[in-house]
Image (cartoon, rainbow, N blue to C red):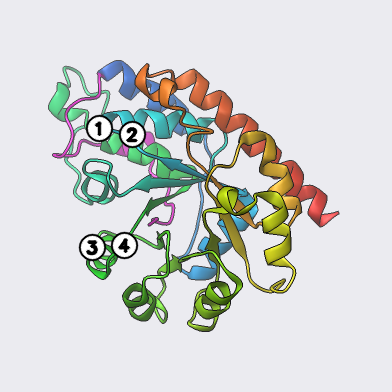
């Protein structure tokens, strides 16, 4: 699931009642980071969302044990060049924290601002400046509707969920169903999917499978997902993937455990660079 980007100036980095864990120093760090990004102007159309996915080449898939950890890891990935971020549904408060709308009137740098004035909304501002957020592993129509009602424009699941396909085929929320076989790919496309996910691509054969499955369907955009390493990002894109989903390759378990956000930043940078170079080669 994702929400389209709208720039919010540093003066609007306001607190959310959902979050009271970020320190004032962390808040100030995000203020500096956010102010350096240009404003984006994206409309709420499937075409815009699809275009951003295809131009980015990487969807960073984040699983976290807490909202605070998710935000800090997401910020590191964003600063490393990620522009499409997937938050797995099992992340605590994924919908409420990332898509809650209310703001209070306190600036992050207000004199004497306490924890209640420095909420997780700070990092949402950073994320919304330069990326779309997606909550993945959506398996039911209820979850999909909750996501849409929260402001989502982008849903992805590991399989074809017929109820979601039926409910969202005519709306402006982009749904990417998971597929494995030629029959599933064609069925999803004929049912209205504008882009599909090939999953689990590594278990199916990796780059050779991606190349083979793309040949009969050159007109269907595909995202490759599962077991992809940073070193293979360029190969997948060169062999037919519009984008790849990277999970542990960016958010390594040891990096998350030890809160090594520099490592996450470095991995995100390398992945984004590989994707951009491959996309450029495809265009030349």
Instruction: Rate crowding at label 2 as few (under 14), some (14 to 19) or many (20 or more) other CA atoms within 10 Å.
Output: many
User: Residue 196: which quarter of the image?
Assistant: bottom right
Q: Nearer the viewer, residue 52 or 166?
A: 166
Residue 131 in the image, given as x and y percentages of width and height: 48, 46
Per the image, the residue denoted by label 2 is: 70
Q: What's the magenta region?
A: 1-23
In the rendered structure, the answer to whether residue 215 lies left or right of residue 91 reads right
Per the image, the residue denoted by label 4 is: 139
Residue at the location (66% across, 42% down)? Answer: 233
Q: Nearer the viewer, residue 22 or 58?
A: 58
Indicate whether residue 8 is drawn in magenta: yes
Residue at the location (52% across, 80% down)? Answer: 187
Per the image, the residue denoted by label 1 is: 66
Residue 54 in the image, given as x and y percentages of width and height: 62, 57
Per the image, the residue denoted by label 3 is: 146
Residue at the location (27% across, 66% down)? Answer: 140
Earlier in the chain: of badge 1 and badge 4, it is 1
Instruction: Determine whether the residue tagged by mark 2 lies in a helix, strand or loop.
Output: helix
Earlier in the chain: of badge 4 and badge 3, it is 4
Image quadrant where one finds the C terminus: bottom right
């Amino acid at each position: 699931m994702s929400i389209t980007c709208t720039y919010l100036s540093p003066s609007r980095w306001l607190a959310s009642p959902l979050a009271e864990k970020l320190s004032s120093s962390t808040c100030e760090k995000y203020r500096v980071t956010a102010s350096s990004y240009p404003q984006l102007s994206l409309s709420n159309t499937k075409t815009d969302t699809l275009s951003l996915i295809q131009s980015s080449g990487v969807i960073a898939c984040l699983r976290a044990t807490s909202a605070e950890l998710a935000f800090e890891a997401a910020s590191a990935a964003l600063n490393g060049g990620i522009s499409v971020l997937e938050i797995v549904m099992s992340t605590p408060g994924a919908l409420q924290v990332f898509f809650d709308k209310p703001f209070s009137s306190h600036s992050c740098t207000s004199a004497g601002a306490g924890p209640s004035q420095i909420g997780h909304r700070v990092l949402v501002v950073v994320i919304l400046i330069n990326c779309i957020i997606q909550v993945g592993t959506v398996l039911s129509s209820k979850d999909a509707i909750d996501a849409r009602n929260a402001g989502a424009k982008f849903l992805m699941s590991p399989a074809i969920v017929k109820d979601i396909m039926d409910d969202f085929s005519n709306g402006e929320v982009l749904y990417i169903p998971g597929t494995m076989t030629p029959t599933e790919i064609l069925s999803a496309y004929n049912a209205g999917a504008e882009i599909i996910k090939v999953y689990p691509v590594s278990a199916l054969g990796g780059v050779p499978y991606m190349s083979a499955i793309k040949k009969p369907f050159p007109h269907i955009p595909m995202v490759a997902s599962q077991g992809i390493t940073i070193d293979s990002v360029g190969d997948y894109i060169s062999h037919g993937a519009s984008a790849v989903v990277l999970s542990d390759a960016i958010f390594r378990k040891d990096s998350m455990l030890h809160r090594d956000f520099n490592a996450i930043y470095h991995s995100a940078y390398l992945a984004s660079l590989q994707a951009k170079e491959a996309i450029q080669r495809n265009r030349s």
